[in-house]
Image: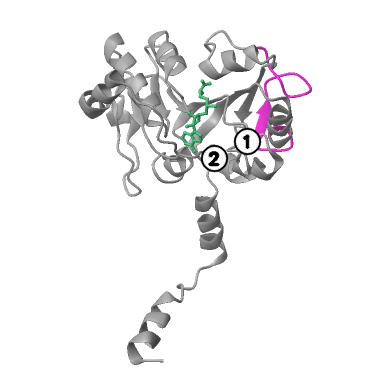
C-alpha cells in the first residue's frame, strides 16, 4: 500500500465516542419523519419567502431561546410539535392571545401554509421553527420553560418494523421533563389505538408525570383543541380518537 493510501485509511477511522455520544448518533439516524419533496403552492412559497423573517426562528444548536425576549408579557408558553399545516396552531393562538405559541414542523409546504395563515390573521403571539423537534428540545428550549406541549396526531409509523421511529419514546419523555415547568402539561392525541395504548403505558408508568385522565390514561377532548386535518382523515377511515393529558409533577 502506498504512503497516501495508508494516510487516507487512517483518516477513515472514526474518532472514539462514549456511550452517550453513541446513543445520540443512533438517535440522529432514526428520526420520526421522512422529508418528502411534496407539492408546494405559489402562496406557500410566497409566505416562506416573505413572512419567515417575521415569524420564523432558524434552528441553531448554540442559541437557546429567550422566551421573555421573544414573547414579552405573555402569561404562558405553549409548544405544538408537528403542527402539519398549522390550522390548529393558528386557531389556538387566535383564541388565546395572552399565551405565546411556538410551533415546530419539518414539512415545508405546511410551514408555508401556516405562515400564510399567521399573516392573514395578523397574529403576533406565534413563532415557528422548521426543524426536528427533538433537536429543538435538546438544544434550543431552556429547562423549565414550557407550560404546555401539544402533540396532535403524530405520525403513527404503524408497521412494527417502523415503531422505532415513533416520537413518543424514553428520550422524548426525558426532553419533556427537562423542558416543561413543574406542573406543566403534555397533551397528546392520536387516532391509532395501539399508539394510544403505548402513549398511555409510557406515561402511566413514569413517576415524573401525573395522569389527568381516567384509569386507562385517556381524557375527554379539551374545548381548546381544534379538530385537526389528520384527525378528520382518521375519522374518514373509521378510526377512534384518544386524547391523553399528563402533568409534570411539582416535586
Ligand atoms: C400525521 S401529521 C399530523 C399533523 C397535524 N398535527 C394534524 O393533526 O393535522 C404529523 C406531522 O408531524 C411532523 N413531524 C414528525 N416528526 C417531527 C419532528 N421530529 N419534528 C417536527 N415535526 C415532525 C410531520 O412532518 C407531520 O407534518
The residue sitting at 26% across, 22% down in the picture is: 47
Looking at the image, tell me whether mark 2 or mark 1 is earlier in sequence order.
Answer: 2
Image coordinates of residue 13 in percent, x first then y, are 46, 76
Along the line of sight, the residue nearer the viewer: 102 or 164: 164
Q: Residues within 10 Å of mark 2 (few under 14, many from 20)?
A: many
Along the line of sight, the residue nearer the viewer: 225 or 44: 44
Q: Furthest residue to the right? A: 215
Q: Quadrant of the N terminus?
A: bottom left
Magenta stretch, main secondary structure class: loop
- The residue that disc 2 covers is 32
Any atom of ligand 1 within 8 Å of the CB at mark 1? Answer: no
Quadrant of residue 198 within the rendered picture: top right
Q: Quadrant of the C terminus?
A: top right
Q: How many marks?
A: 2
Tell me how far mark 2 sits from mark 1, CA to CA.
8 Å
Image coordinates of residue 201 in percent, x first then y, are 74, 34
- The residue that disc 1 covers is 157
Q: Is residue 98 left or right of residue 251?
A: left
Mark 2 vs 1: CB contact within 8 A: yes
Image coordinates of residue 21 in percent, x first then y, are 51, 61
The residue sitting at 41% across, 27% down in the picture is: 103
Q: Is residue 37 left or right of residue 184?
A: left
Any atom of ligand 1 within 8 Å of the CB at mark 2? Answer: yes
Q: Is residue 175 above or below residue 25?
A: above
Front: mark 2 or 1: 1
> What range is drawn magenta here?
203-220
Amino acid at each position: 500500500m502506498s504512503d497516501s493510501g495508508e494516510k487516507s485509511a487512517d483518516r477513515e477511522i472514526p474518532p472514539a465516542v462514549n456511550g452517550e455520544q453513541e446513543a445520540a448518533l443512533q438517535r440522529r439516524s432514526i428520526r420520526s419523519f421522512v422529508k418528502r419533496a411534496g407539492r408546494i403552492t405559489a402562496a406557500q412559497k410566497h409566505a416562506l419567502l416573505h413572512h419567515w423573517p417575521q415569524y420564523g426562528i432558524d434552528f441553531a444548536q448554540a442559541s437557546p431561546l429567550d422566551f421573555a425576549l421573544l414573547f414579552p408579557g405573555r402569561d404562558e408558553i405553549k409548544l405544538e410539535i408537528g403542527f402539519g399545516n398549522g390550522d390548529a396552531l393558528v386557531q389556538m393562538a387566535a383564541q388565546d392571545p395572552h399565551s405565546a405559541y411556538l410551533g415546530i414542523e419539518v414539512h415545508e409546504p405546511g410551514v408555508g401554509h401556516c405562515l400564510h395563515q399567521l399573516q392573514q390573521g395578523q397574529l403576533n403571539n406565534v413563532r415557528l421553527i422548521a426543524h426536528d423537534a427533538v433537536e429543538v428540545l435538546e438544544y434550543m428550549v431552556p429547562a423549565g420553560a414550557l407550560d404546555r406541549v401539544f402533540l396532535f396526531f403524530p405520525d403513527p409509523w404503524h408497521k412494527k418494523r417502523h415503531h422505532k421511529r415513533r416520537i413518543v419514546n424514553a428520550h422524548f419523555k426525558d426532553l419533556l421533563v427537562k423542558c416543561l415547568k413543574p406542573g406543566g402539561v403534555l397533551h397528546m392525541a392520536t387516532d391509532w389505538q395501539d399508539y394510544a395504548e403505548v402513549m398511555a403505558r409510557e406515561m402511566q408508568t413514569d413517576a415524573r408525570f401525573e395522569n389527568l385522565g381516567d384509569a386507562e390514561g385517556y381524557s375527554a377532548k379539551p374545548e381548546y383543541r381544534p379538530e385537526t386535518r389528520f384527525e378528520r382523515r382518521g375519522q374518514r377511515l373509521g378510526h377512534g380518537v384518544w386524547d391523553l393529558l399528563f402533568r409534570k409533577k411539582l416535586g
